[in-house]
Amino acid sequence: MSKRKTDSDDTVASSSTVKRPYAQPDVDTQTKSKAYDLPEHISYESLAEKYPGLKAYLLPLRTPGATANSATTTCRYTIDFKNASATRVLNRALLFVYFDLNVVLPDDALCPAVANRLNYIKWLRSNIVEEFWPGSTVCGLDVGTGASCIYPLLGVRYMGGNTRFVGTDINDASVSVARQNAHANELDDRIHVYLNSDRNTVFPIHRTDFTLDWKADADDSVFTFSMCNPPFYDSPAERQQLRQMKQVGRPTLDTSGKDDELYTEGGEEAFLTRLVNESAIHKTRVKWYTTMVGKKGTLKLLKSKIRGAGAKHISEGTLIQGRTTRWVLAWSFLDKTRFCLDVQKSADDARVWFEATMEELQISKSIVDREYIGGVEMAASYKCSAVKKTWTRQWRRQQQHKEENEQDGQNASGDIENKPVIEFKVGIVPETQEACHIHMYLDPGYSSSVLMSLYNHILRKKPDRENPTSVVIEDTAV
């Protein structure tokens, strides 16, 4: 077994590598796999002990007022963020130590800031992935994955579980290195890198050669989400102008890279307009389309275009890392598939009430394995199935008509109903000792409007409901 390199050499290590003794992440309760994350505070000195290649770039940072000869000097360390080699080695160290990833970051390619990239992944997990039943297969599509393949690599590590990624790029050299990075970390079965030979196409998912390496299952033709960190600039001149507008006197992270990683004709606005237009073509092939946005002015324009494209839901987030602010914009052409009830009762009391409600509505239920939502274990979880819409006025009128006919001596006609009109899963998650959330997830192939009507009925019957006539649907529809 060969040992992974820990210097600044950019040679891809063999896939038959030993794990580091200090890389012992906890278990992520939500995905039941190793938990990878950056710590809140990072000591560059401690990091260099685990990744010796960083030591050559450490710079002493003394406490204010101390002198070089002071006996009480407390010395901390930093690096020169304007030094491309230093930032490259720093990010390799972060990936190696905290994510168990040995990654090549070529000198002529964009060097990704790990913390910034992880913020986007975290936002996706909290706001998009949790829209689906925990443990479901997650498949992300990364547009412009780059040589580092940073988002797929961080995605499978941080999201864990059944997460898989497809990364696309228009640059041959970047695709080659990205594939090496996936292979060197033994992730060929979870990351597929595709060369997009059509520079005028953002999403190549319609092309006949767009095939996946892994064994397909029923939902592989649909991506859970797409993501994109677009080229922000129209030209080097625009980039330089924006850099000069930033506050001076503080370290500026080096962001050298290939031209197609930094620049695009028309800048960010033109590129993301194409992305929105293509999403309107593919629609439900991707459940949630998302992108980073670097300019606030672009954000307002894009939301208008997304609404015009017919999206049913729009979500927005703000990511702040140091002095850098970016926005995330997400949209979907699908109906809502998750609804949540906030109940001011203990999880045990809510479970008793929910089971009684299901029995009253003649909805069958079976207990399934309890999963985790937001890192909190469910107090109870069910698989539910209804063969009649017993909660609707139409069904109640039909029952009344049937009873009247039977009283008149007429035989009721009609086939026996045994095919489900809806199937869904339910997870009850405690918030406090006296409050909990009841999450309802629609199974694929069933109507969102049916689950919404059931949700509204249950909402009116909530045991803690003060105003039974006011129904508020928890929705983010446009």
Image (tube, rainbow, N blue to C red):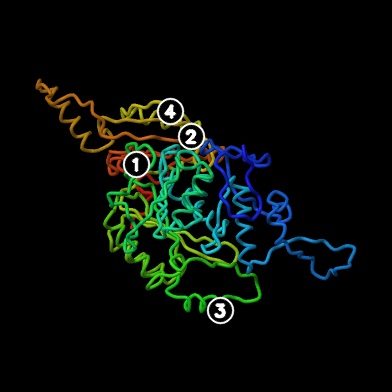
Residue 244, label in figure? 3
Circle 1 crowding by C-alpha within 10 Å: few under 14, some 14–19, many from 20: some
- The image shows residue 381, relative to residue 287, as above or below, that is above
**Residue at image coords 85%, 63%:** 73
Q: Nearer the viewer, residue 366 or 85?
A: 85
Question: In the rendered image, which quarter is residue 453 located in?
Answer: top left
Q: What is the x, y in percent for residue 196?
A: 36, 56
Residue that numbered label 1 is attached to: 220
Task: Give how far apart the Cα atoms at labels 3 and 1 are.
Answer: 45 Å
Residue that numbered label 4 is attached to: 368
Residue that numbered label 2 is attached to: 371
**Residue at image coords 43%, 49%:** 128
Q: Amino acid at mark 2?
A: Glu
Q: What is the x, y in percent for residue 442?
A: 34, 39
Circle 2 crowding by C-alpha within 10 Å: few under 14, some 14–19, many from 20: many
Q: What is the x, y in percent for residue 188?
A: 46, 42
